[in-house]
Image: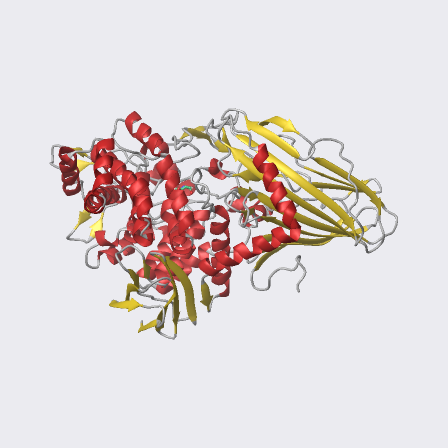
């Protein structure tokens, strides 16, 4: 049986050594998470903070941080918006040997490797240090945040010295310095805190034992709360093992003390012991991989990138908590303050729908619970219905900062919170698609339909009838944020039209299948026939930016007249295009930040008649500067669907880079990771989950020997494998179901897989 410290072959990403320039990115990329807890992959032994300066910003090279989902507070810093607060670091260990601190920076690092074992969901470290005194210390560590019991985490750390009789002192504590929370309770094994302005409450309980070889555990001294101290004399070659279990509980209710929950959770994990915790966690990850692994034979880098993507997507989600959703960096860093964007519904949801529908549901329920704030936002801007926050935290109030301080200290206004309205249609699209793909009627009737109707109501009030007889949407920002305050953004207009039309269908369906609930919902929303007639009018009259003669959408009114820029001439640039050209020239040019019309091709292919999807892709793809991490994977997916496998692979290679890119310092860009999955499964794999039946129309690159994965579809699990020009669909779980495979309608039964030539 392999030792618990041995990484699973073929499933691990490793990083050798330590480099101040990339440390923060490594900590993000190898971060652990279980949807409730997140922890960056900082080294736990005697960390020394170092900082680097980059593009005028000063940033700590190492950024040790632990997070609890939903624990937002408004810090006393610029900008004053709710931000995910760091919580006490539960992995800290301080070791002194004959009076010298053991550290990864003093002395000589003889070896040092951190490995993220994605299969087991554990972070492993293995290092050897020669201290200035000449003493050689070897360390091994395993850390996890339990996928089986989200409140719990485990750290196992082994130290071996090469000399006898060294006086060793070890201190395990929770790093409390600099914590912006008010302490409420500081008992020996339990601490509790309250956030300063939002009054959310957090409790952590801990239990740690130390064993010298096979001997009985050492008795700790307990000098103060949440701190354990041991001392002993070393024997050369004897391994000392630290086993730390900790549990966390959060309460959003000021009157509810979370400490009893943390203590209960600690009893639960103590009862099964650290090995029990590890085994349950590994079993839970095995289940997740059975559902979410994608196998590509023929591209090793992409295979690792796909697993890396599924690892982080899985680590970010929590099907048990409808009060939180996935932020733009998951729980791996504090860029974007932990805020939730359209990234979740558009870039992540398809993965969860196919691999983990319960997680998808919880994220959509978060949007349901934040509907009141979306209604308030719409009303404050003078509209009806629900306008979701462009950046959302706990309550769904708009949390986009109104300004940021630029590199030279200047204040830069941010308009997205005011104008990037497509978020409401993005949420509605995700709601509808989730319901179609899962048949989760309970969700649709009790939550989804209301979101559909309230977002449609927003759009109908947003699209204003003008003298030309058309309904316009002025002063918006589409996905391309290089162009702010534009009129009639094609993406926004078409998504809005779809949202209203689909809400009308949803209401009809509700009336037909659940008449009582439909009547109750209409009464609750005071939604009557005159308003529905206005919605139909909006569907017909919202400005279309499509020109049937050229087959092109104009990205927004006036886009075609902007300065064309040949991006190929800037191929060697090292900074984004808006930095190269400056903000003013960029916005007066045709340079696009990220997939905009191209994203529309992906989301609403029916809005592109005949060959116009290709026409638009060919027009817009060369104009996109990919100034956002969301862009390349979306281009990969569309290119794959349009049959340009080489271009799709080129884009995928950009997002599949495994190097610790400094851009990841503030956390992994999880939307890009969701995009990788979409490009492979929905793009090359040709899976279409948007219709009444699951449709498969694969177009894999010729250089791949095979591609296989599973998808959940309306209560079934279907395995799809594509190899040698044949696609095979196998019903792994659930009842017979109709599917469409390479254009032909078939019934998939439990007994016989279906095969088709591609
Ligand atoms: O949601 C995105 C946006 O589209 C581009 N800027 C970053 C945001 C968060 O990822």
Where is the N terminus found, in terms of image quarters? bottom right
Tell me residue 402's x, y (percent).
40, 28
Q: How far across and how far down the image is residue 328, in percent?
A: 45, 42
Q: Quadrant of residue 501?
A: top left
Q: Is residue 512 left or right of residue 442?
A: left
Count of numbered marks = 0
Protein image colouring: secondary structure
At a point 28% along the width and 52% down the height, the residue shown is 601
Residue 19 visible in image: no
**Residue farthest to the bottom, as pictured:** 724
Query: Which quarter holds ligand 1?
Result: top left
Q: Is residue 513 above or below residue 582?
A: below
Residue at the image position 35 percent from the left and 59 percent from the top: 682
Location of residue 428 with respect to 720 vertically, above or below? above
Q: Is residue 357 left or right of residue 27?
A: left
The residue most toward the right is 165
Q: In screen coordinates, is 156 left or right of 421?
A: right
Quadrant (top left, top right, bottom left, bottom right) of the C terminus: bottom left
> Looking at this view, is 714 or 482 the one in front?
714
Can the viewer see residue 27 in this picture?
Answer: yes
**Residue 498 percent coordinates (x, y):** 23, 45
Out of 14 and 289, give the one closest to the viewer: 289
| Residue drawn at point x = 49 percent, y = 26 percent | 198
Q: Quadrant of residue 680?
A: bottom left
Q: Position of residue 698 (x, y in %)?
A: 33, 66
């Amino acid at each position: 049986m392999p030792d618990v410290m041995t990484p699973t072959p073929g499933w691990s990403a490793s990083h050798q050594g330590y480099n101040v320039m990339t440390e923060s990115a490594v900590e993000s990329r190898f971060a652990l998470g279980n949807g409730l807890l997140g922890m960056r992959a900082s080294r736990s032994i005697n960390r020394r903070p170092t900082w680097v300066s980059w593009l005028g910003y000063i940033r700590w090279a190492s950024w040790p941080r632990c997070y609890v989902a939903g624990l937002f507070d408004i810090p006393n810093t610029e900008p004053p918006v709710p931000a995910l607060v760091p919580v006490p670091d539960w992995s800290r260990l301080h070791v002194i040997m004959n009076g010298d601190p053991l550290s990864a920076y003093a002395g000589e690092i003889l070896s040092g490797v951190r490995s993220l074992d994605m299969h087991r969901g554990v972070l492993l470290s293995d290092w050897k240090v020669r201290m200035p005194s000449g003493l050689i210390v070897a360390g091994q560590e395993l850390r996890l945040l339990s996928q089986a019991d989200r409140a719990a985490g485990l750290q196992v750390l082994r130290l071996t010295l090469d000399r006898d009789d060294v006086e060793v002192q070890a201190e395990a504590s929770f790093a409390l310095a600099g914590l912006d929370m008010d302490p409420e309770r500081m008992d020996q094994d339990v601490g509790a805190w309250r956030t300063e302005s939002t009054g959310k409450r957090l409790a952590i309980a801990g239990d740690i034992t130390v064993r010298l070889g096979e001997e009985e555990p050492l008795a700790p001294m307990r000098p103060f709360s949440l701190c354990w101290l041991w001392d002993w004399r070393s024997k050369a070659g004897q391994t000392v093992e630290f086993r730390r279990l900790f549990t966390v509980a959060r309460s959003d209710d000021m009157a509810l003390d979370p400490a009893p929950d943390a203590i209960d959770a600690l009893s639960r994990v103590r009862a099964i012991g650290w090995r029990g915790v590890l085994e349950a966690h590994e079993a839970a990850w095995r289940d997740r991989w059975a559902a979410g692994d994608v196998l590509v034979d023929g591209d090793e880098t992409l295979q690792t990138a796909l697993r890396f993507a599924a690892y982080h997507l899985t680590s970010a989600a929590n099907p048990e908590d409808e009060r939180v959703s996935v932020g733009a960096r998951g729980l791996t860093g504090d860029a974007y303050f932990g805020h939730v964007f359209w990234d979740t519904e558009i870039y992540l949801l398809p993965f969860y729908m196919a691999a983990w529908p319960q997680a998808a549901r919880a994220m959509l329920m978060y949007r349901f619970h934040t509907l009141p704030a979306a209604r308030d936002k719409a009303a404050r801007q003078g509209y009806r219905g629900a306008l979701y926050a462009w950046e959302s935290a706990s309550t769904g109030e708009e949390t986009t900062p109104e300004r940021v301080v630029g590199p030279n200290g200047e204040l830069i206004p941010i308009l997205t919170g005011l104008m990037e309205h497509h978020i409401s249609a993005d949420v509605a699209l995700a709601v509808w698609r989730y319901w179609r793909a899962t048949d989760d009627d309970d969700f649709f009737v009790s939550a989804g339909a209301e979101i559909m109707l309230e977002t449609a109501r927003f759009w109908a009030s947003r699209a204003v009838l003008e003298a030309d007889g058309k309904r316009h949407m002025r002063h918006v920002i589409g996905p391309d944020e290089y162009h702010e305050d534009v009129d009639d953004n094609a993406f926004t207009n078409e998504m809005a039209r779809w949202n209203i039309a689909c809400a009308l269908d949803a209401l009809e369906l509700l009336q037909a299948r659940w008449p009582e609930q439909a009547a109750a919902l209409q009464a609750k929303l005071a939604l009557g026939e005159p308003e529905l007639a206005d919605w139909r009018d909006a569907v017909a009259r919202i400005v279309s930016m499509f020109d049937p003669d050229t087959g092109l959408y104009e990205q927004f009114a006036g886009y075609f007249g902007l300065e064309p820029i040949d991006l190929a001439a800037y191929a060697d640039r090292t900074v984004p295009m808006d930095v190269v050209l400056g903000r003013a020239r960029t916005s007066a040019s045709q340079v696009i930040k990220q997939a905009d019309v191209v994203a529309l091709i992906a989301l609403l292919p029916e809005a592109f008649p005949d060959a116009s999807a290709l026409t638009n892709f060919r027009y817009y793809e060369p104009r996109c500067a990919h100034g956002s991490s969301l862009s390349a994977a979306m281009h990969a997916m569309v290119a794959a669907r349009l049959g340009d496998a080489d271009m799709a692979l080129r884009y995928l290679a950009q997002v599949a880079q495994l190097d610790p890119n400094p851009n990841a310092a503030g956390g992994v860009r999880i939307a890009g990771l969701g995009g990788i999955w979409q490009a492979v499964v929905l793009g090359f794999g040709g899976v279409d989950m948007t219709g009444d039946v699951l449709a498969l129309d694969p177009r894999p690159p010729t250089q791949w020997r095979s591609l296989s994965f599973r998808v959940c579809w309306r209560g079934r699990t279907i395995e799809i494998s594509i190899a040698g020009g044949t696609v095979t669909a196998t019903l792994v779980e659930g009842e017979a179901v109709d599917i469409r495979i390479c254009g032909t309608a078939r019934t998939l039964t439990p007994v016989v897989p279906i095969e088709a030539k591609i």
